[in-house]
Image (cartoon, rainbow, N blue to C red):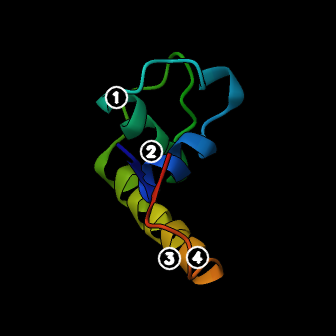
Amino acid sequence: MGESLSTCLLDQSMPSNRQSTRRDLAFYMTAVARLGGYLDRSNDPPPGTTVLWRGFIRLADLVEGFQAANPSASPTCG
């Protein structure tokens, strides 16, 4: 079963030291928050709605840009 394009782009956006962690909801919410400016330091509180909103907007821009650059690419990967 293929993964969605958004999931693939989020996987690639995470730093290499986090690539081996479990892919659960918390992982992807942190990935979206990082796109929105969340620093993900050990003492930081959980990301807020504004940071998540910015991250989702950035993710939508990344997906749109990828699709524009690769019009013949499949909407899934994997």
Q: Please name which of the two marks, 3 or 2, marks the residue nearer to the observer.
A: 3
Proximity of marks 2 and 4: CB atoms separated by less than 8 Å: no
Disc 2 secondary structure class? helix
Q: Residue furthest right?
A: 16
Residue at the spot x=56%, y=82% of the render? 71
For mark 1, what is the residue? 26
Residue at the spot x=62%, y=77% of the render? 70
Of 39 and 30, the residue lying toward us: 30
Mark 3 residue type: Glu
Q: Which of the labelled discs sits on residue 33, or is there none?
A: 2
Q: Position of residue 33 (x, y in %)?
A: 45, 44
Q: Please name which of the two marks, 1 or 2, marks the residue nearer to the observer.
A: 1
For mark 3, what is the residue? 64
Q: Position of residue 77 (x, y in %)?
A: 49, 52
Mark nearer the N terminus (1 vs 3): 1
Mark nearer the N terminus (1 vs 2): 1
Mark 2 residue type: Ala
Mark nearer the N terminus (2 vs 4): 2
Mark 4 residue type: Gly
Proximity of marks 4 and 3: CB atoms separated by less than 8 Å: yes
Task: Assess disc 3: are there few (<14), some (14-19) or many (≥20) residues with their C-alpha within 10 Å of its C-alpha.
Answer: few
